[in-house]
Amino acid sequence: MKIRVGQGWDTHRIVIGRPLILGGITIPADFGLEGHSDADVLSHAITDAIIGAIAAGDIGMHFPDTDPRWKGAGSLQFLQHAVKLATDAGFTISNVDSTVILEKPKLKDFRLTIRESLAATMGLALDQVSVKFKTAEKVGPVGEGRSAESQAVVCLLSP
Ligand code: C5P
Ligand code: MG
């Protein structure tokens, strides 16, 4: 059996007048994230983790932010594409673990909905998808409420 581990990280600037979308779920907030796509920082980190596990480059290589096709694009389609790349390479996803670092709002009440959305997108069971939340303790750009970050790791298996 082959085992592959992938890691992903992403950050987006906080702006007024855009929705806050995490794992495909719109979170009630008085700000959103800036980006060419829907700026779903969590989906981007998981997508990069999967692409990284199969050494297939990175998210920007597959979905350039200069390509008008991806302007305002829903990031779950990027995630779905990464899963297909992994599947085509002969891998299944064993599990995903992720962290969103955002000072506010509190996200824990949305954990189940976000996990369900990500699991459905990736064709996984709920217990294969973990999403954690942290503040940055008011330190740095995330802590000062200027940006959001996400980190993800994924384990892929091939028989
Ligand atoms: O960052 P801190 O350790 O203070 O976070 C404590 C808990 O608050 C986290 O484990 C998480 O459950 C929750 N949290 C949250 N939404 C955030 C940040 C943290 O629900 N934006
Ligand atoms: Mg991104």
Image: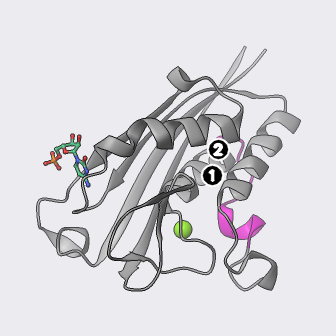
Q: Is residue 117 left or right of residue 97?
A: right
**Residue 50 locus on image (x, y percent):** 64, 44
Count residues near mark 1 (Cα–Cα under 10 Å), then give few for <14, some for 14-19, many for 20+. Answer: many
**Residue 107 locus on image (x, y percent):** 31, 50
The answer to whether residue 134 is magenta is no
- Residue at (60, 54) in percent of width and height: 48
Helix, strand, or loop for circle 2?
helix
Amino acid residing under circle 1: Thr
Q: Which one is in front, 118 or 53?
A: 118
Any mark on residue 7, and which? Answer: none
Which residue is identified by label 2?
A: 50
Task: Check the image and report above or below for 93 versus 60.
Answer: above
Task: Check the image and report above or below for 136 versus 82.
Answer: below
Which residue is identified by label 1?
A: 47
Task: Check the image and report above or below for 87 versus 42.
Answer: above
Q: Is residue 110 left or right of residue 3?
A: left
Amino acid residing under circle 2: Ile
Q: Could you tell me if the residues under marks 2 and 1 are in contact, i.e. CB atoms within 8 Å? A: yes
